[in-house]
Amino acid sequence: MSYTDKLKELATVDIFKEGSKKENFVGRPFSLDYDRTHLLICDSWKTKVGGVPQGTFLLAFYDNENDSETEEALLLRAIKPVKLPTDSDVISSMIEYYKDNLKTSGKETQLDDFTRYEFSFSGLECRILGTFYKEKKSPIVFGADVENFYSSHNYNVFKPEGKVLEFIANLRDTDDFTDNSNNEKIGKVRYSSSMRFQKDMSDVPVSISPKDFLGKRTALFGMTRTGKSNTVKKIIEATVKISNKAKYKLDKYQGDIISMLDPFDNNIPKFPVGQIIFDINGEYANPNMQDEGTAIYELYQDDTIRYSVVEKENFKVMKVNFYNQIIEGFNLIENHFRITGDDADYLGSFRVINLNKPDDYTPFNSPGTRYDRKKAAYLSCLFKAGFPISNSFKVKFDGIQELNDILGIDPSKGINLEDASTWFTEVWENYNKLKYIIEYPKKHQGRKWGDEELESILVFLTKKKQPEAKPTVSGYEKLRPLIKFHTAKVDNAFDVEIVSDLRKGKIIIIDLSQGDPQIQKLYSERICSKIFNESMERFINNKSNNFIQFYFEEAHNLFPKKDDKDLSQIYNRLAKEGAKLNLGLAYATQEVSSISSNILKNTQNWFIAHLNNDDELKELKKFYDFEDFTESLIRFSASTDKGFVRMKTYSNPFVVPVQIDRFSVKGD
């Protein structure tokens, strides 16, 4: 039987019958309100059901012989021990026995039966997660609160197992198991780090709905080597499966505007889902000895395209021809200066120059002349900085005759960049002497020969803030760190190709493992901005957007910090505006407290593994019902409990403790 068929069986589970078996009895409430209940339990009952670890799901069934029509059960989660009203007397008795050095346990216990019976009871505090009840139209309905609670003596509490526990762990806000054909198994229920009881029990599978992740924000928090990357790979795997069911190709789809607004067709995405992974450690793109057989590329070679910041076999290189791809190259320069935080005044003027070709461009007309001159001066800066170029590359622009005659260089006929650099250098040196430049404003309604943008470029080229001055600034030398991003071999910008492949439903892996943090930020922001802007343009023009899922490893190295209020940053925009553009975001990090609150507040899916300090837990307690797990999250072992997470997805009404299955190219 397939896993989908097994899930369909859950629709027929009657928890009121199967969940209240005598052998699964745990205890009875002695206190009950809308949020919490306190149970009376004893050692023998706990042992009989295989223990009650922290986080265990329990069911409190309403059982009143005077009210046979009411069928409901409260879903509980075990939180922590609580004092019983009789505990003070029990503790006093225990101390007296201890003082007399009398054995109180084992075969030779000297306690009488009544005292031993009293000593075995304890209290358990539980959170109430919601209510199961029956309706005529639907066999079982779940509400995530308590509409009306009865006196606590009317309830009996049982520990669910088997199909009943599977029903609870796989409960959805959005369906009642009648439409679960796209759910994918991700792991099994696991309550605790210790497995003395659980290892003897049958596994209870837990599934996810890939639809929960498409266009949504997903967080994966945990220390290094706790299984975050493995979980991401399982999500990618589930997304590939649902993507393969898409009915249409984006470039051939001829739907109306109304259907464009709905990206799903019977809960299946209309178009293949593109996925892009920013691989900081190289573990998605490359096989590794530590986790053999776990690279995404190994499983999906035919649908995966890998990019690298350095030349590598079977990888596309992420470089730009700065001379041919002017806008793309200048964007890298601008981002570089923004990330490095260089605040030189002349640099600020250079960063804002506009190198887009004018809409009314014609060679040697006024806008065309100014654009060609500005572009040639900018390219001369690249040449002076040492960006490699072929000898055949030439620029053409309208020069100044008196300077042309002096230098023997006529730019209007096409010149190489060495001559162009010489020509512009002489222009700046004689800017206040050349008659043509001096008289230019009188003949052109007060406009200067060189506008502010051209002048800022000439400062950059000559290192002189003023004509005839001595060099006082670094100028074009500041561009030299970007030479490593330049190549003369690329015809199309890599980010354009990436967007095109994502629209086809490909998996793109950006291998950033051989780049320093600055390079990682530079490429990540550029690619994200390109995808976002292209998606926004399609949205504005009423064109369909297929789902594109972003995955970020070590997100704290890329994302804005918690106290960063700049909401215009691309990651904040993906979190805030990505949903309407069908852009999903998944990020993994060990630092909850470092992530921008703007991103956290917009996160719908959560996978929480081991965290090792209170600062992270304090941040986590703000969301959903993770407060119930903060003590256990800091306590269990990162090495032996790999893949043990607390999971809350978009359609799950509550957090579920799960042991995530291991991703493998060989399958389950």
Image: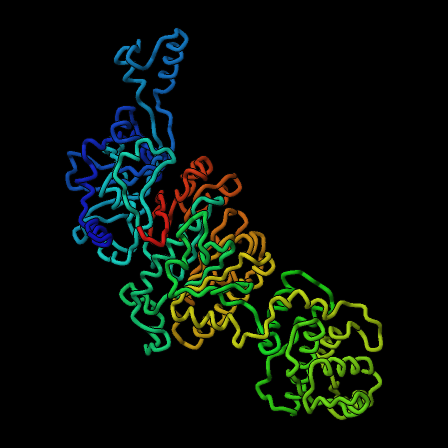
Q: Position of residue 326 (x, y in %)?
A: 60, 76
Is 535 located above or below residue 53 in the figure?
A: below
Q: Examine the rendering and report whether any part of residue 247 can be seen.
A: yes
181 and 228: which is toward the camera? 228
Q: For residue 656, what is the image quadrant?
A: top left
Give the residue furthest to the front. Answer: 313
Is 242 located above or below residue 145 in the figure?
A: below
Q: Position of residue 512 (x, y in %)?
A: 53, 59
Q: Position of residue 527 (x, y in %)?
A: 51, 66
Q: For residue 85, what is the image quadrant?
A: top left
373 and 164: which is toward the camera? 373
151 and 100: which is toward the camera? 100
So how many labels did they put on this image? Answer: 0
Q: Is residue 615 left or right of residue 199?
A: right
143 and 570: which is toward the camera? 570
Q: Examine the rendering and report whether any part of residue 568 can be seen.
A: no
Q: Residue at x 25, y 56 (%)?
A: 180
Is 87 located above or below residue 428 in the figure?
A: above
Q: Position of residue 33 (x, y in %)?
A: 33, 36
Q: For residue 19, what is the image quadrant?
A: top left
Q: Which color scheme does this rendered protein use?
A: rainbow
Q: Residue at x 38, y 35 (%)?
A: 193
Give the residue furthest to the top. Answer: 100
